[in-house]
Amino acid sequence: MKTNKSYSKRLKVTKNGKIVGRKAGQNHFNAKESRRNQLSKKRATAFPFPLTNKDKGRYLANA
């Protein structure tokens, strides 16, 4: 089965196997936010829901 490239490019697998990605919808309309909030939206966070091993194999090439 082919890896879903568009999805895999949005995620990163850390050295310990955690899946990290950014929240959706945080790129613009941030002028009213404090600088602290603006910067926190750029940071990658732990993936919000656990993926099964089957999903990991499908979406992430080396997971």
Image: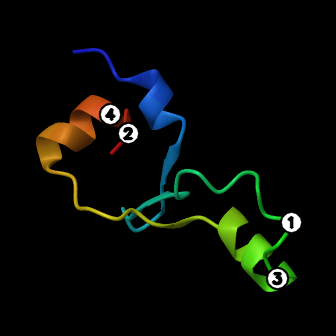
* Mark before the other along the chain sequence, 4 or 3: 3
Q: In front here: 8 or 15?
A: 8
Q: What residue is pinned by disc 4? A: 59
Q: Amino acid at mark 2?
A: Asn
| Local SS, label 1 | loop
Q: Residues within 10 Å of mark 2 (few under 14, many from 20)?
A: few
Q: What residue is pinned by disc 3? A: 34
| Local SS, label 3 | loop
Q: Residue furthest top?
A: 2
Label 4 vs label 1, nearer the camera: 1
**Quarter where residue 18 is shown:** bottom left
Distance between the alpha carbons at the discs numbered 4 and 3: 34 Å
Label 4 vs label 3, nearer the camera: 3
- Percent x, y of residue 51: 21, 53
Label 3 vs label 2, nearer the camera: 3
Instruction: Residue at 54%, 35% (x, y): give it.
Output: 9
Instruction: Residue at 45%, 35% (x, y): give it.
Output: 8
Distance between the alpha carbons at the discs numbered 4 and 1: 34 Å
- Residue 43 lies, with reference to residue 9, above or below; the image says below
Instruction: Residue at 33%, 45% (x, y): give it.
Output: 63
Q: What residue is pinned by disc 1? A: 31
Q: Residue furthest front?
A: 32
Q: Residues within 10 Å of mark 3 (few under 14, many from 20)?
A: few
Q: In front here: 42 or 26?
A: 26
Q: Amino acid at mark 1?
A: Ala
Q: Which mark is residue 62?
A: 2
